[in-house]
Image (tube, rainbow, N blue to C red):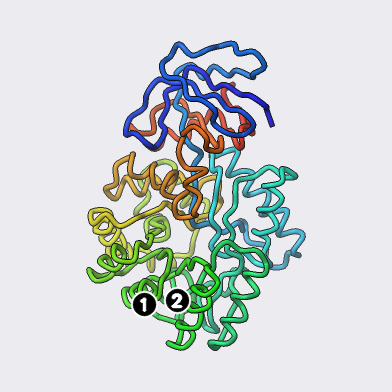
């Protein structure tokens, strides 16, 4: 770690005040030590590495609050092979896209916990991980072909599985309450999976052990049930209702809309980035048809939640990770969010959903120095986040693309 680093002559987007301002940022031992206003900040400081960013835009590192590390999927891979692949995918997200932190939504064999420890220790270079371990579903549940879903049946079995996850070192518990867009005929987003006893038991042990529940809930009844039982976040929420929006506010819960799941099909892709992504994913026509059948309601409830002031963080549920956050940011703006709303969702609000806002998510004195520098103003166009110049994690430059 560089003992002292100065990022001089920047335009700072701190994700605290609305606009960019001229500033230089001084980093010491991995934390932001000082923010110097104005363009006249030092270009030479004794004992420091000084990088003159020459008027480029400095902001917090990006977050993706709903990720799966696997891509491409390797169904016959060993745990060791999966770990290496996941580590490489995470490293690419950090160094090629400026994603300095992620929140996992399903990872087999607690590989995300292992990678979190490796990245935190500095043995490997990658983003911060807020780990959820296995995706806990049911027999005839969702995502069973992925390799990261663990089917559980019965109230006692859910309690045991959640205890195992806690003992394994997860930060939150991912519960799969409904079907989704991708899956067989018995896995549709309007299907709910848990019995009442399973639902009550799973949430009760999480409350008892102080574990946040990340709830995959794609229909209104499941969303409301999860919120009433204390879910920390609702993932997807393709179909909701007015009562659900009220419950978000009453319970202080978060919504992670994952717009890319329904929005990225050949007929809907408009930007060059979206078209390239859709062509590379090459999803089956039946999956695209299901996405397009759901997109109208999904978009409408995202817009209503945004207008209602529901707490929202950006999570993509897309792969590969190096493309995911920027695609999701673009979709937020396409659906009516301002660039600032989208950027805040991918920085300060994502840190808040992970319980890390005291340390991360904004550029403020005392916080950890997870920072990116981009060439043009993302508050004008979030696509400017793609023009990455520098990535700093814990005060250390991990990617320098200025050349």
Distance, label 2 to label 1, CA atoms, is 9 Å
Number of marks present in the image shown: 2
- Cβ–Cβ under 8 Å for marks 2 and 1: yes
Quadrant containing the N terminus is top right
Element class at badge 1: helix
* Residue positioned 59% across, 85% down in the render: 157
Q: Nearer the viewer, mark 2 or mark 1?
A: 1
Looking at the image, tell me whether mark 2 or mark 1 is earlier in sequence order.
2
Question: Which is nearer the eye, 173 or 296?
Answer: 173
Quadrant of res 146: bottom right
Q: Is residue 179 above or below residue 398?
A: below
Quadrant containing the C terminus is top right
According to the picture, the residue beneath numbered tag 2 turns out to be 177
Question: Which is nearer the eye, 59 or 364?
Answer: 364
* Left or right: residue 402 compared with residue 236: right
Q: x, y (%) of residue 82?
A: 71, 59
* Left or right: residue 393 compared with residue 272: right
* Left or right: residue 44 compared with residue 328: right
Q: Is residue 32 above or below residue 171?
A: above
Q: Is residue 334 visible?
A: yes
Q: Residues within 10 Å of mark 1 (few under 14, many from 20)?
A: some
Which numbered dot is residue 77? none
Q: Is residue 265 visible?
A: no
Element class at badge 2: loop
Q: x, y (%) of residue 59?
A: 46, 33
* Residue positioned 42% across, 51% down in the render: 314
Q: Is residue 18 above or below residue 45?
A: below
According to the picture, the residue beneath numbered tag 1 turns out to be 225
Q: Residues within 10 Å of mark 2 (few under 14, many from 20)?
A: many
Q: x, y (%) of residue 362?
A: 45, 38
């Amino acid at each position: 770690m560089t003992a002292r680093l100065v990022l001089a002559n920047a335009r700072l987007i701190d994700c605290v005040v609305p606009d960019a301002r001229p500033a230089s940022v001084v980093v010491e031992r991995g934390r932001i030590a000082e923010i110097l206003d104005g363009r006249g900040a030092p270009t030479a400081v004794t004992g420091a590495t000084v990088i003159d960013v020459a008027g480029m835009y400095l902001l917090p590192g990006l977050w993706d609050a709903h990720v799966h590390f696997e891509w491409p999927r390797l169904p016959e891979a060993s745990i060791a092979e999966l770990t290496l692949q996941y580590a490489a995918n995470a490293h690419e997200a950090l160094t090629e896209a400026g994603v300095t932190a992620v929140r996992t939504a399903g990872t087999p064999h607690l590989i995300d916990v292992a990678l979190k420890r490796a990245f935190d220790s500095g043995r490997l270079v990658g983003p911060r991980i807020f780990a959820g371990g296995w995706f806990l579903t049911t027999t005839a549940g969702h995502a069973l072909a992925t390799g990261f879903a663990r089917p559980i049946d019965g109230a006692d079995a859910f309690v045991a599985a959640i205890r195992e996850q806690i003992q394994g070192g997860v930060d939150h518990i991912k519960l799969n309450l409904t079907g989704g867009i991708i899956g067989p005929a018995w896995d549709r987003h309007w299907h709910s999976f848990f019995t009442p006893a399973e639902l009550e038991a799973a949430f009760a042990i999480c409350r008892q052990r102080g574990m946040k529940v990340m709830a995959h809930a794609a229909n209104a009844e499941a969303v409301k049930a999860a919120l009433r039982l204390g879910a920390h976040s609702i993932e997807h929420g393709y179909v909701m209702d007015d009562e659900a929006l009220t419950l978000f506010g009453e319970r202080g819960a978060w919504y992670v809309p994952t717009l890319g799941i329904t929005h990225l099909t050949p007929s809907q892709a408009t930007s060059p980035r979206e078209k390239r992504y859709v062509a590379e994913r090459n999803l089956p026509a039946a999956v695209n048809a299901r996405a397009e059948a759901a997109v109208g309601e999904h978009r409408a409830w995202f817009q209503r939640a945004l207008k209602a002031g529901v707490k929202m963080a950006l999570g993509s549920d897309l792969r590969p990770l190096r493309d995911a956050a920027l695609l999701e940011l673009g979709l937020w703006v396409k659906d009516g969010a301002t660039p600032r709303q989208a950027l805040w969702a991918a920085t300060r609000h994502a840190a808040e959903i992970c319980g890390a806002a005291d340390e991360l998510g904004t550029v403020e004195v005392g916080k950890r120095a997870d920072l990116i520098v981009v060439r043009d103003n993302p508050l004008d166009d979030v696509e400017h986040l793609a023009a990455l110049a520098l990535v700093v994690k814990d005060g250390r430059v991990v990617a320098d693309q200025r050349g």
